[in-house]
Image (tube, helix red, strand yellow):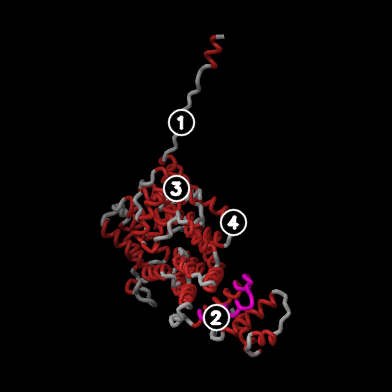
Amino acid sequence: MGKQLSKTGKKAQVVPFLQDGQYYYKKGLKAYREHNFEKASKYMKRAIELDPTDSEKLSQLATIYTDMGHYQQSNELLSHILKEVDIHLNECHYFMANNFAHLGLFQEAYKCATAYAEKEPFGEFIADNEDLIELLTIEDEDDGNFLQDPDDLIIKQDAAKSLLENSQFEDAILLLQEIVKEYPEFWSAYNNLSLAYFYVGEVEKAKAYLQTVLQRSPGNLHALCNLLVFYYYERKDDKVEELATSLSNVHPILFEHRYKLGASFALVGRYPIAYKWLRYLYKQGFEGDDTFYYWLSYSAYHTGKVEFAKQVWNRVLQENPQKEGFEPWDESKHGQHHYINMTVEERLYAIFLAAQTNNKQQIEEYQTARVPQTHFEKEFLELSLMKQKGDLSKVSSQVKCAFNTAEILYESTEDDNFFLFAFRILVKASKEKASMKNHAGWAAALSYLWKNEQGQKVSQANIAKEYNISVSTVAKYISYVKDC
């Protein structure tokens, strides 16, 4: 009996098996040597999560990215190493030179290669680096030496970013189209082009550019975050849920990617995970812009960290005093976040209705909302405020025509769906530089086509009589609408 008790009373010995960063690093190297790059990158990312400042692990992941053909992603990581981890890890310059060469960015490749030569004249890769420099400086018989040509990618990229920030979306689109044509694997330009189309209401084009990125650079975080926002905008709740769940399992290494992830989650109302990433960056000393602190404050407030939210909001006001009055705890202004969830025509219609009811406060609220506005939309807002003063000299003829057309239509109908249809066509007409002088003609044509689409039998002669214009004018403007 005693023997039995002794046997059963013995406690099991549990030996914990701690899987540290080095464990995953070795597994990653093994997968890499077997040319299983997907598995190698997965293990290496896990190793870096456990040892985030280990330059050896970071540079190995950059090498894996290069072998996978993810040259831009590799360079982002190498740049991160030099800026945040080890400024003296000079071989990063050589690896970046190779990546830039693969992307066709030869000026940038040359800059990095010469930087490596200057910093490591007897370095491990100096012979290969000299070969790369020689290759980069070969004179092309047709184009001449590329080093004597202005490499304007960085200039164009900065200019496009500035255009986006200033809501000059049409100009940004033209410049970004030029960039993607010249640099067909420069994914950030595709992502920015997608955003520009999104902001002007051309969502299908925006999504098409995102799909191009995701097909050719699977897992591109900026593209996935933009797609999440697009789904939210389109009210595709099931797709938002699916993609948000997938992105919640992503653990990016770069500060820029963590910021993008946190801000995107905040924008679509996923505050707990938004707070996780934005708070992490804050604790790491990340110096963001007013947008960073704005979303950090909102995500903190909506996760119950009220005092911290107020502390961060003071930083928002330091960076951008115009945000005063838009605190996350001001319930009267929470509707501004829904503006991003509206189409351009929905916003224009809402502004128009506010103008009809002399609701100046609502119009001003739209002006200060954190949603990018097209040039057309900005002018429409200005006109809505100026109309009461009678000063319309600064407003374009296209915007005046759209507003006056809506006013004519408002006298005979208040059908919401019809007005959304009308504003969608009027915005397209403005983009395509259609003649927008005769607002009665536009009103008549829109009314005629809408009624026909709804199955109402109406003749062009009756419409011409209703709007006091000729039948030929009705026919003319119907063709304009059909061309939009």
- Residue drawn 49% across the image and 60% down it: 337
- Specify whether 28 is left or right of 344: left
Q: CA distance from mark 1 to mark 3?
A: 23 Å
Which amino acid type is shown beneath numbered disc 4? Asp
> Can see residue 53?
yes
Residues tagged 2 and 4 counted as in contact (Cβ below 8 A):
no
Residue 446 sits above or below residue 327 on the image: below
* Residue bearing the label numbered 3: 45
Q: Position of residue 128 (x, y in %)?
A: 34, 58
Q: Is residue 16 a member of the stretch shown in magenta?
A: no
Which mark is in front, 2 or 4? Answer: 2
Quadrant location of the C terminus? bottom right
Q: CA distance from mark 2 to mark 3?
A: 58 Å
How many neighbours does mark 3 have within 10 angstroms: few (below 14), some (14-19), or many (20 or more)? many
Q: Residues within 10 Å of mark 1 (few under 14, many from 20)?
A: few
Judge depth for marks 2 and 1 and give the one in front: 2
Q: Quadrant of the rendered structure where residue 452 is? A: bottom right
Mark 1 residue element: loop
Closer to the camera in the image, 358 or 48 = 358
Check residue 16 in the rendering and tell me which mark sits there, or answer none.
Answer: 1
Picture disc at residue 305: none
Quarter of the view holding residue 143? bottom left
Mark 1 or mark 3: whose residue is earlier in sequence? 1
Which label sits on residue 404? 2
Q: Earlier in the sequence, mark 1 or mark 4?
A: 1
Q: Is residue 412 magenta?
A: yes
Task: Name the residue at 55% across, 79% down.
Answer: 429
Badge 4 crowding class, 10 Å Cα cut-off, few under 14, some 14 to 19, many 20 or more, is few
Q: What span is colored magenta in the figure? A: 399-419
Q: How many marks?
A: 4
